Image (tube, grey):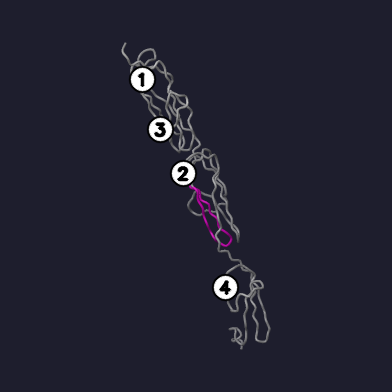
Amino acid sequence: GGVDNINGLNGYTYAWYNGSTKVSSTKYYTAKESGTYRFVVTTGAGASSEASFVVNIDKVKPTCSLSPSGTAGTNGWYKSNATVTLSTSDILSKVERYGLTTSGSATYNSSASNTQSDTASQTWYGYVIDYAGNETSCNNPVKVDTQKPSCTVTLSGTVGNNGWYKSGVSVTLNSSDNGPSGVSKTGLGTGSSPTLGNKTSASQGNTSGVTYYGRVQDAAGHISDTCNSGSFKVDSSNP
């Protein structure tokens, strides 16, 4: 008789409940959702016993996002140091661990914020794991250039007397970018605020006095201080 009882024979019945809702009449039951489950065993004579189980199920991954903040420039660049912030959430078991790093390997360092200085491109990674063991990651590339470009204007020609050139003069705009984004626009002209485009050179004929001005802009949107050639004179004609 004892063996029969163990195997659920001789009139034994089984019932599983999630709260007040009956979910199964089998001896074994696989829970598919969280809840407080009761397992009730009833004999053929009507005697019963039961046990309760709290089941927590979380199959949903947590979420994460990375948000850079700073002074926005152009072409996806930041013109100031950028603060990278990790945001995480989990709707069921809640976030257990998280991390923010430049490593492509899962790192849980409890960091949710960091600062990015000048770099052509740095990818930041966020990692998060919930109490159920579900993991997820996110990433965001960040480009930072905090420095203005610079420029000079140089002259090339045959130097004569008394500050004059005896030939036509080639005017050249030279530029450099102290940050990582690189020069993207140039401007050269005789006005004090030359239009930014792609002009880097000019030719100057006879004049009793002229000054060339230059400006450059980098890809991040920084505009250089205006540079100039200083006033110069040209007389390429024989008397």
Q: CA distance from mark 1 to mark 4?
A: 92 Å
The residue most toward the top is 239
Q: Amino acid at mark 1?
A: Gly
Q: CA distance from mark 2 to mark 1?
A: 45 Å
Q: Which residue bears the numbered disc 2?
A: 121
Q: CA distance from mark 4 to mark 2?
A: 49 Å
Q: Residues within 10 Å of mark 3 (few under 14, many from 20)?
A: few
7 on left or right of 143: right
Quadrant placement of the N terminus: bottom right
Q: Which residue bears the numbered disc 1?
A: 205
Q: Which residue bears the numbered disc 4?
A: 30
User: Which segment did they paint magenta?
Assistant: 120-140
Q: Residue at x 45, y 27 (%)?
A: 194
Q: From the viewer's side, name the closer residue of 126 and 228.
A: 228
Q: Which residue bears the numbered disc 3?
A: 198
Marks 3 and 4, the one that precedes in the sequence: 4
